[in-house]
Amino acid sequence: MKSFPIFIFIGLAPLFALTDQIKKEEVFWESFEWILIALCLSFFAAHFFSLRLLPTVFIQGIAFTLSFIAYKFARQSLGDRLGKLPVLFFWLGIEYIFLKLHWPTNSLFLGDALSLQMDWQHWNIHTGYLGASFWILLVNLILYYSYFKTGKMNWPLFILFLIMLSVPIVYSYIADKEVITREMMISFYNNNETPALLTYEQRGEFIPRTSAWISVLILIFALVKNKTKKK
């Protein structure tokens, strides 16, 4: 529903809930079939069910499933207090890898779901184009905590969900600043074209770039902790 993509802000919350059903004693890559299927179907639909793009669909479906697998590995080593926030870092880090590698050429980013609603993103001059991906993931995460985590409605968190969903949209219409488009991002990273906006030239896609580094640190720390436990 690119013309009014409101469901993208609730569609990922059940995937966060699925990770709660995975048993700690399982091998870290097991029990992710439903997440993989859901993501592959989503990317397939986003590509308008093009059979020609099935390889890209499977590559991205597997890659973003890895963000949940990496979270499970980190949780097994660092404990439940880790929370679900690392999933956001892993997901955004993978988006940054796709952006930097320029492959697959038809890669879709979560922020592309809002491509027909750029009027909602007049703030992305400060965050970069993939700031929309972070926004979508964060809103879904808050929705997960407001209902899916316990199965009961947590009204303060649900109100926070509505605030985090609506405030960026309202601010966008008030601010009415320049917007970073996908084409501008791709030209900057793939074609080394200097953007007309100085703010974007200086920062680039700093949110997924920072997330990639945080992801590496989390995995290194989890690996070290895992090795220490075994000894």
Image (tube, rainbow, N blue to C red):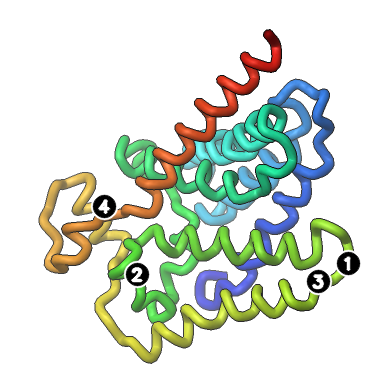
- Asked whether the residues under the numbered discs 2 and 4 touch, taking CB atoms below 8 Å apart as contact, a structural biologist would say no
User: Which residue has dot 1 on it?
Assistant: 152
Q: Position of residue 16 (x, y in %)?
A: 71, 50
State the residue in front, 2 or 99: 99
Task: Please tell me the numbered disc located at residue 124.
Answer: 2
The answer for how far apart the CA atoms under marks 1 and 4 are is 42 Å
Judged from the image, the secondary structure of the residue bearing numbered disc 1 is loop
Q: Position of residue 207 (x, y in %)?
A: 38, 54
Task: Please tell me the numbered disc located at residue 154.
Answer: 3
- Asked whether the residues under the numbered discs 1 and 3 touch, taking CB atoms below 8 Å apart as contact, a structural biologist would say yes
Q: Position of residue 63 (x, y in %)?
A: 53, 35
Image position of 184 (left or right of 16) = left
Q: Which residue does the image show at 56% across and 36% down from the upper left?
A: 58
Closer to the chain start, of discs 2 and 1, is: 2
Which image quarter holds the N terminus?
bottom right
User: Which residue has dot 4 on it?
Assistant: 186
The answer for how far apart the CA atoms under marks 3 and 2 are is 30 Å
For label 1, count other residues whose C-alpha is less than 10 Å away and answer few (under 14), some (14-19) or many (20+). Answer: few
Amino acid at dot 4? Ile
The answer for how far apart the CA atoms under marks 1 and 3 are is 6 Å
Q: Which quadrant of the view contains residue 159? A: bottom right
Q: Residue furthest bottom?
A: 174
Nearest to viewer (mark 2 / mark 4): 2
Amino acid at dot 3? Asn
Closer to the chain start, of discs 3 and 2, is: 2
Judged from the image, the secondary structure of the residue bearing numbered disc 2 is helix
